[in-house]
Amino acid sequence: MSVDVGEVLLPPNTHGPGLDVEDIRQAVDPYTNTTLFSRTHAGMKSPFLSPESPLNAEILNAWGGAIVRYPSAYLAHRWQLTKGLFGTRPRSWPHDLVYVDDVPQVLTNPPVDRNHGKLHLASIRAFEALRDTFAFCAWPYLLLLMCAIVTAWLARKHDRRYSYASLAIGVSGLLYALPLPFVAPSAEIRYLTWPCFAAIVSAAFSGRFIFLANSRTEQN
């Protein structure tokens, strides 16, 4: 938003001296917020604040004030991130936003060798070929999720076991996804892990009900 409106909207205590719009412009990428902390010349304070830090209130007030003053810029920013989060990701974006082909070292845990198996390498090649297509989009999963919820709702009087399980899982995934256009800090697909997984499980329960219903119909 600072870049779009040509004004530094960050509270003074969150960054070093000399931060200007151009410094923010060269540091910000459209798909993540971490570069703001690593690439600004003026420097940014760590975002991991203690609950009692007075800077929390400053950031909250500045955030709310920026939205009130520049609602169009806020909505444009959130729409851009929402498209990146739920839609296709351009090939120019890092593949880490979709999948990570690496074995991270966690603290003092023993190192783990990378998988060099043929099946793994073939899978990675397939992921790379498909990562800018709808195959790695979230919206097909959300569509499947909503279809499963509707099916489970219509079937709740006929088979409570499967329909209620489908409803519980499906609604949970949907409620998880709904606030993301407003609160997701970046377009990384990991924020949609549960909604996408919930769509598959909820649809499986709904499909199980449809299969049982057809079997009963044929028997009758």
Image (spheres, rainbow, N blue to C red):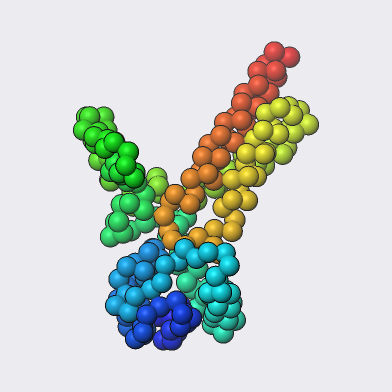
Q: Residue at x 58, y 67 (%)?
A: 52
Q: Residue at x 29, y 41 (%)?
A: 103
Q: Nearer the viewer, residue 128 or 9?
A: 9
The quarter of the picture where the C terminus appears is top right
Number of labels in the image equals: 0
Residue 138: percent from left, percent from top:
47, 49
Residue 151 seen from this side:
no
Residue 128: percent from left, percent from top:
28, 46
Q: Residue at x 49, y 73 (%)?
A: 76
Q: Nearer the viewer, residue 82 or 212?
A: 82
46 sits to left or right of 143? left
Residue 104: percent from left, percent from top:
31, 44
Q: Is the residue 167 above or below the residue 50 in the image?
A: above
147 sits to left or right of 200? right
Q: Is the residue 89 above or below the residue 146 in the image?
A: below
Residue pushed farthest right? 157
2 sits to left or right of 42? right
Q: Is the residue 191 above or below the residue 197 in the image?
A: below
Residue 77 seen from this side:
yes
Residue 150: percent from left, percent from top:
67, 42
Q: Nearer the viewer, residue 144 or 71?
A: 71
Determine the image quadrant of residue 172.
Answer: top right
Q: Residue at x 47, y 72 (%)?
A: 77
Q: Nearer the viewer, residue 130 or 2?
A: 2
